[in-house]
């Protein structure tokens, strides 16, 4: 199951009693701030859910394209990483 932004906004609207449009704008503003924080190199932590953080990666002298067998260098870059919080991690462990 995939939960899209519009569906998330509908859940927020029902839970809070606000209009669908206001909930959609609030969800959008939340994700925009999270994105901006990660781009700036910050960390987004939501207790009971998890944390998003940016991790730098090392460059690689070469990576092979499996289709063409061409080897190209991979420059160092940054990746967003999600680390589930204790409550989520335990729930997922026992949900199987």
Image (cartoon, rainbow, N blue to C red):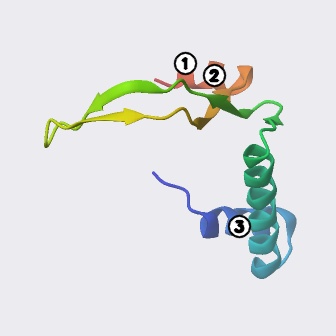
Per the image, the residue denoted by label 2 is: 89
What secondary structure is found at the residue carrying circle 3? helix
Residue 9: which numbered mark, if any? 3
How far is mark 3 from mark 1, CA to CA? 28 Å
The picture places residue 36, in percent across and down from the top left corner, at 78, 54
Q: Mark 2–mark 3 contact, CB under 8 Å?
A: no
Q: Quadrant of the C terminus?
A: top left
Question: Would you say 80 lies left or right of 62 here?
Answer: right
**Up-down: is 90 above or below 59?**
above
Q: Mark 2–mark 1 contact, CB under 8 Å?
A: yes
Mark 2: give few (<14), some (14-19) or many (20+) Cα within 10 Å.
Answer: some
Residue ID at (38%, 24%): 61
Out of 57 and 88, give the one closest to the viewer.
Answer: 57
The picture places residue 73, in percent across and down from the top left corner, at 37, 33
Q: Residue 27's image quarter?
A: bottom right
**Up-down: is 10 above or below 71?**
below
**Up-down: is 60 above or below 42?**
above
| Sequence-earlier tag: 2 or 3 | 3
Per the image, the residue denoted by label 1 is: 93
Residue ID at (73%, 48%): 39
**Up-down: is 25 above or below 80?**
below
- Residue at the far left in the pictured view: 68
């Amino acid at each position: 199951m995939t939960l899209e932004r519009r569906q998330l906004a509908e859940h927020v609207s029902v839970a809070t009693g606000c209009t669908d449009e206001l909930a959609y704008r609030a969800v959008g503003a939340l994700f925009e701030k999270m994105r901006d924080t990660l781009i700036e190199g910050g960390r987004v932590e939501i207790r009971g859910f998890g944390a998003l953080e940016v991790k730098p990666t090392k460059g690689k002298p070469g990576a092979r394209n499996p289709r063409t067998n061409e080897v190209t260098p991979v420059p160092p870059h940054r990746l967003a990483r999600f680390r589930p919080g204790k409550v989520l991690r335990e729930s997922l462990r026992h949900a199987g």
